[in-house]
Image (tube, rainbow, N blue to C red):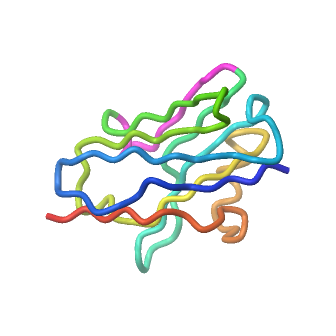
Amino acid sequence: QVQTVASGGGLVQFGGSLRLSCTASGSDLSSYSVAWSRQAPGKEREGVSCIRLSDDRTWYLEFAKGRFTISSDNGENTVYLQMNNLKPEDTAIYYCAADYSCPELASRMRETSFWGQGTQVTVSS
């Protein structure tokens, strides 16, 4: 099973940018899909974006379209989430995970242990 670690979060002003990294170990990522999710205080986890690494097909939740870009560096076994034009409502802990498909990842949103520790993103107004 692939283990993933999210990093790259921080404090940024309204309209700023951050690039999150999801680094994998335990297996080659190329046959997996990787998703980013987030959880804001007092709210349930929600999906952000997913990439199918066999062909780099991507999916985005509506709020992420046009602002966030998911990409991969297979040589580094890493998936990135470039976030631009950040808003205070993007403040959350961001998590990543790998599984065999994006639908499978979407079905596991409520499994806290599956998503690991995450990285905090705070956007100030």
- Closest to the observer, 51 or 121: 121
Q: Position of residue 77 (x, y in %)?
A: 67, 36
Q: What residue sits 60% from the left and 34% below the top?
A: 51
Q: Position of residue 36 (x, y in %)?
A: 55, 49
Kindly give the residue lying farthest to the right in the view shown. 1
Classify 109 as above or below 54: below
Classify 31 as above or below 39: above
Q: Position of residue 79 (x, y in %)?
A: 57, 38
Q: What residue sits 68% from the left and 28% below the top?
A: 53
Residue 64 part of the magenta segment: yes
Quadrant holding the C terminus: bottom left
Kindly give the residue lying farthest to the bottom in the view shown. 42
Where is residue 122, by image quadrant? bottom left
73 relative position to 89: left or right: right
Where is residue 92, by image quadrant? bottom left
- Closest to the observer, 87 or 29: 29
Q: What residue sits 34% from the left and 47% below the top?
A: 18
Residue range (magenta)? 55-65
Where is residue 55, by image quadrant? top right
89 relative position to 119: left or right: left
Kindly give the residue lying farthest to the left in the view shown. 125
Number of numbered callouts drawn = 0
Q: Position of residue 69 (x, y in %)?
A: 42, 34
Q: What residue sits 55% from the left and 58% below the top?
A: 95
Classify 39 as above or below 58: below
Kindly give the residue lying farthest to the top in the view shown. 55
Residue 100 part of the magenta segment: no
88 relative position to 90: left or right: left
